[in-house]
Amino acid sequence: MQGTVDGFTYGLVTPLVAYFMACLGGALGLRCTTRSMLVAGPWRAGWLALGSVAIASGIWTMHFIAMMGFTVEETPVHYDKPTTFASLGVAVLMVGAGIFIVGYRGATGTALFTGGTVTGLGVASMHYLGMAGMRLNGKLEYNTLTVSASVVIAVVAATAALWAAGQVRGFLWSVGASLVMGLAVSGMHYTGMAALSVHLHGSTGAGPAGDSAAALLAPMMIGPFVFLCLAGVVVMFDPLMVMGKPDWSPAEIKRPGVPAHPVATHVVGRRPAVHPVQERGHRRSRTPQSR
């Protein structure tokens, strides 16, 4: 017996809130990745890590906000806590891998293809691992063609987001890119949900194990939401105030003949160390003439 699946129990509330969270995470991740291009060393790794967690948290929060509107009429839907947490970890690790590839190798074709594929597969893995954490009185079945389409959407969306992270510089362009990214990620989610059907078991029994969506997901989403708010506060400030001023800029390091430490050169230029030697030498040369 097929279950009656409804992905919009609360109407447009859950899709719109989910889309907003995906856009928020994407916007913060893009800004952090853009800031990482201005620094080097551990500061670059710090900004890339912050951007990775921001994007992954936004996508994960989007997924489970949308899932709060998912119901099956004939059976309650519960969630397994370890599997749900694992889906967040997978998202952070694989999104981070893709962002670090582009962050250190640049937005080249090879880096974008590799990073976009890894990130897109991470987003799809997060989605279907989260779906595997559902507990209900039935079996989940998927349409292979629709699942493949959702994975392709995830890879294309991830590649476009990584390209935007390496190319987009202005604030308005970043906002536009995050809106498109949020739309693509949400589209991937609902495409994956369209592939789902539920085959109910014959007997209801004692009911599914796990926690309900309201009991489990709402408290769990507080952490990623607070992180996104804190990341937003960090991005609002000048990165030189937050992370500290780097010793060199990318423009300086690319110019030929510029020393590795221009600050030290500037200090020597203000107080040349050779002047006292020249003055002493000049006085010694005049001593024989005076005699």
Image: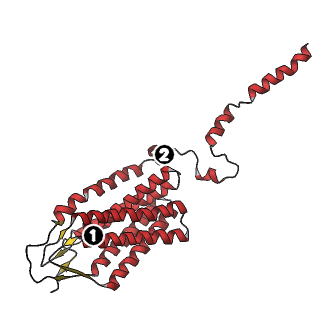
Q: SS class of the residue under badge 1? A: helix
Disc number at residue 238?
none
Q: SS class of the residue under badge 2? A: helix
The image quadrant of residue 261 is top right
| Residue assigned mark 1 | 130
* Between 62 and 274, the one nearer to me in the picture: 274
Q: Is residue 95 left or right of residue 79?
A: right
Where is the N terminus found, in terms of image quarters?
A: bottom left
Q: Is residue 23 left or right of residue 11?
A: right
* Between 162 and 120, the one nearer to me in the picture: 120
Where is the C terminus found, in terms of image quarters?
A: top right
Give the residue type at disc 2: Leu
Q: Can residue 23 be seen here?
A: no
Q: Position of residue 103 (x, y in %)?
A: 50, 60
| Residue assigned mark 2 | 240
- Residue contact at pointers 1 and 2, CB within 8 angstroms: no
Q: Can residue 62 be seen here?
A: yes
